[in-house]
Amino acid sequence: MITMKDFIAEVDPRLREASQEVTFPLNDEEKTLIEEMRTFLINSQTPEIAEEYGLRAGVGVAAPQLGINKQIFAVYLTELDEDGEVVDVIIDEIFINPKITRHSVKQAALPEGEGCLSVRRAVPGLVPRPRRVTLTYQDPEGDEYEVKLRDYEAIVVQHELDHLKGILFYDHINDENPWQADDNTVVL
Ligand code: N9Y
Ligand code: NI
């Protein structure tokens, strides 16, 4: 079971490496990894389990965060009602060898900035990213998909894709003016 101790430290150089493309069929190690990554996200978003194991809730996890430099990330994104009950699963997917093939010039940023399970401190500031992206990827069977995403969903996959390139969210923060949105950026 993946817990926070499996996340490598922010200073670990593996977080700054470009990850390798994955070949198909997946080996047993890779199959286990993706299963565990998805289970981690679900556990982390289940308050009783998260509390028991000390998990920080995450919507995404990328293999390099676990010290594995392969082009794999998992996203588990749900919609909650007022009581915090899951009403809908928006994205439950493993993304392998993902590539952004198109992106808007318009950018979007989360009003609170971003965090990262690999960064155990708050780094304040807007993280502007293309508001709309077209992403191609493979699933664990090797089947190819193309999806168009925008706003929060686009931000999540771009945060994860960055991990596969060795980029961390604060690399995008304007250090002179962290909360300044330019004319091209909508704060969601
Ligand atoms: C996990 C990150 C990924 C997100 C950060 C911004 C966009 C993607 C993550 C740190 C603390 C909060 C947490 C989060 C959450 C949100 C909604 C519902 C449930 C992957 N990461 N977080 N960042 N949690 N949980 O570093 O999920 O947003 O690379
Ligand atoms: Ni992250």
Image (cartoon, rainbow, N blue to C red):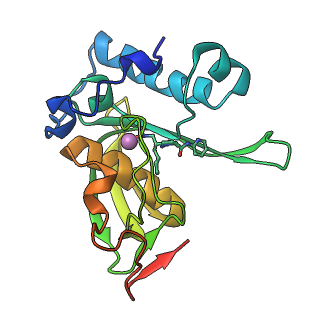
Give left or right: position of 106 versus 21: right
Image quarter hosting the C terminus: bottom right
- Quarter of image, res 158: bottom left
Q: Residue at x 79, y 41 (%)?
A: 84
The image shows a total of numbered marks equal to 0
Give left or right: position of 159 versus 27: right
Depth check, front residue: 137 or 104 = 104
Task: Pinpoint residue 142: horizontal percent, then vertical percent.
Answer: 31, 34
Q: Is residue 145 visible?
A: no
Q: Residue at x 23, y 27 (%)?
A: 24
Q: Is residue 153 visible?
A: yes
Q: Residue at x 24, y 42 (%)?
A: 164
Task: Pinpoint residue 36: horizontal percent, then vertical percent.
Answer: 46, 18
Above or below for 88 versus 154: above
Depth check, front residue: 46 or 79 = 46
Give left or right: position of 134 versus 37: left
Depth check, front residue: 111 or 21 = 111
Depth check, front residue: 183 or 43 = 183
Residue furthest to the right: 83
Residue furthest to the front: 176
- Quarter of image, res 8: top left
Above or below for 144 versus 129: above
Residue furthest to the bottom: 183
Above or below for 102 versus 106: above
Above or below for 110 versus 176: above
Task: Pinpoint residue 123: horizontal percent, then vertical percent.
Answer: 39, 51
Q: Residue at x 31, y 30 (%)?
A: 65
Task: Pinpoint residue 139: horizontal percent, then vertical percent.
Answer: 38, 36
